[in-house]
Image (spheres, rainbow, N blue to C red):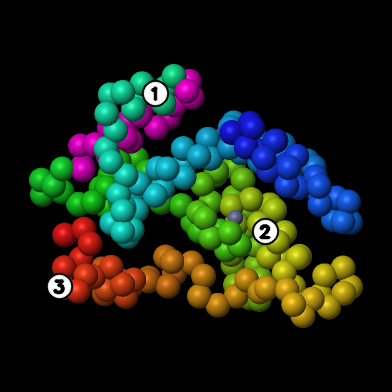
């Protein structure tokens, strides 16, 4: 992760853009590292997408003992925080009259979605909210809030931004399908095969 953030992303990609006049937010590189390494971002992402497997066209395999050992060796303290949930994930991976894990009580709070990057607000301490165009929105981080509230506006720092993208329209998956029947969701997402079966059953 260190090499990816500081060498690949920062030194080879962002810093060279400075000579073209772009302002590079150097302190945000530290924050990226902080999020990924100290705040467990990558583990939260894995857990979130494993939680929602029934809404995907793929599912992460249950972990083996070797996997558990690998994570704990690579990320000391990992098991204390995520191990129990992944044990439950293993248990619930075999159909036996229970629901998919997202509907079972396994001590997991389904997160709000970030309006800007559309990844969920996975690091709780970084989640912020704001009201934009009369709508309360959640953001995974202050920078995503800034992007929506300040940057992606019709004017930015006094200048019109006609070519700027707009963070509007159909955005969060959870809101789009709120109140839908699950069978209709799966079919609407295009996860039904030609023979009428879904990809997972
Ligand atoms: Zn975000």
Cα–Cα gap, marks 1 and 2: 35 Å
Disc 1 + disc 3, Cβ < 8 Å: no
Q: Determine the main secondary structure of the stretch shown in magenta.
A: helix
C-alpha separation, residue under disc 1 versus residue under disc 3: 40 Å
Q: Is residue 186 left or right of residue 75?
A: left
The 10 Å Cα crowd at callout 3, few under 14, some 14 to 19, many 20 or more, is: few
Q: Is residue 90 magenta?
A: yes
- The reply to whether residue 78 is in sight is yes
Q: Earlier in the sequence, mark 1 or mark 2?
A: 1
Q: CA distance from mark 3 to mark 2?
A: 44 Å
Residue 169 % position (x, y): 55, 77
Asked if the stretch drawn in magenta spans residue 86, the answer is yes
Q: Residue at x 50, y 39 (%)?
A: 42
Q: Write down the residue under mark 2.
A: 145
Element under disc 3:
loop
N-terminal of the two: label 1 or label 3? 1
Q: Residue at position x 21%, y 70% from top?
A: 193
Question: SS at mark 2?
Answer: helix
Q: Nearer the viewer, mark 1 or mark 3?
A: 3
| Mark 2 beta carbon near ligand 1 (under 8 Å) | no
Residue 38 pos. (x, y %): 59, 31
Examine the rendering and report whether any part of residue 186 can be seen: no
Q: Which residue is mark 3?
A: 195
For mark 1, what is the residue?
70
Residue at x 89% of width, y 56% of height? 21
Q: Is 201 left or right of 7, judged from the image as shown?
A: left
- Residue 70, by quadrant, is top left
Q: Which residues are magenta?
A: 74-93
Mark 2 neighbour class, 10 Å CA radius: few under 14, some 14 to 19, many 20 or more: many
How packed mark 1 is, by other alpha carbons closer than 10 Å (few <14, some 14-19, many 20 or more), is: few
Q: Residue at x 71, y 65 (%)?
A: 149
């Amino acid at each position: 992760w260190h090499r990816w953030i500081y060498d690949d992303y920062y030194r080879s990609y962002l810093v060279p853009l400075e000579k073209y006049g772009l302002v590079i937010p150097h302190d945000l590189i530290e924050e990226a590292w902080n999020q990924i390494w100290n705040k467990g971002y990558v583990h939260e992402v894995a857990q979130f997408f494993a939680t929602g497997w029934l809404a995907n066209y793929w599912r992460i395999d249950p972990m083996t003992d070797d996997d558990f050992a690998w994570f704990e060796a690579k990320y000391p303290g990992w098991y204390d925080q995520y191990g129990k949930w992944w044990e439950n994930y293993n248990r619930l991976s075999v159909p036996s009259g229970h629901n998919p894990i997202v509907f079972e009580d396994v001590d997991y709070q389904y997160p709000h979605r970030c309006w800007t990057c559309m990844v969920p607000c996975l690091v709780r301490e970084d989640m912020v909210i704001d009201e934009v165009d009369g709508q309360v929105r959640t953001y995974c981080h202050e920078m995503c809030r800034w992007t929506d509230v300040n940057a992606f506006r019709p004017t930015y720092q006094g200048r019109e931004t006609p070519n700027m993208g707009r963070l509007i329209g159909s955005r969060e998956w959870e809101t789009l399908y709120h109140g839908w029947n699950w069978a209709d969701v799966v079919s609407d997402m295009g996860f039904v095969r030609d023979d009428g079966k879904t990809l997972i059953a």
